Amino acid sequence: MSFERTQEKPNILTDAAKYDVSCSSSASHRSNTNKGLGDSTGMGICHSYTEHGRCVLLLKRLFTNSYIIDCDYCVTRKSNDIKRAAF
């Protein structure tokens, strides 16, 4: 496997994670005018909150988007022509 392909994998899998329903803020872009706190920076970043109410940013990434199932509703279905990667 080439070095360029190895470097490309994290980008592919982070982009694919935006379709996961467990993190609704991962594909949004929102700016906060109050000193930048609470900004949503786009793909791959998910917001979670501690028990004290502090916002924590998490990097969201899939381990693979190479699937063998061909569900009609799934963006990463087998028949969809997208770049595939796996760790």
Image (cartoon, helix red, strand yellow):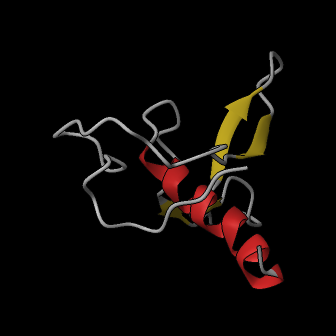
Depicted 50 relative to depicted 61: above or below: above
Q: Residue 85, percent across and down?
A: 59, 59
- Is 86 positioned to the left or the right of 70 in the image? right
Q: Residue 51, percent across and down?
A: 80, 15
Judging depth in this view, the residue of 34 and 66 nearest the camera is 66
| Quadrant in which residue 11 is drawn | bottom right
Depicted 21 relative to depicted 46: above or below: above
The residue sitting at 32% across, 48% down in the picture is 78
The residue sitting at 50% across, 64% down in the picture is 29
- Is 62 positioned to the left or the right of 22 in the image? right
Q: Residue furthest left?
A: 72
Judging depth in this view, the residue of 55 and 82 nearest the camera is 82
Q: Residue 83, percent across and down?
A: 47, 68
Looking at the figure, which quarter contains the N terminus? bottom right
The residue sitting at 53% across, 37% down in the picture is 23
Q: Residue furthest front?
A: 1
Judging depth in this view, the residue of 87 and 27 nearest the camera is 87
- Is 29 positioned to the left or the right of 64 in the image? left
Q: Residue furthest top?
A: 51
Q: Residue 56, percent across and down?
A: 79, 39
Please state the total of marks drawn on the protein image: 0
Judging depth in this view, the residue of 32 and 87 nearest the camera is 87
The residue sitting at 19% across, 39% down in the picture is 73
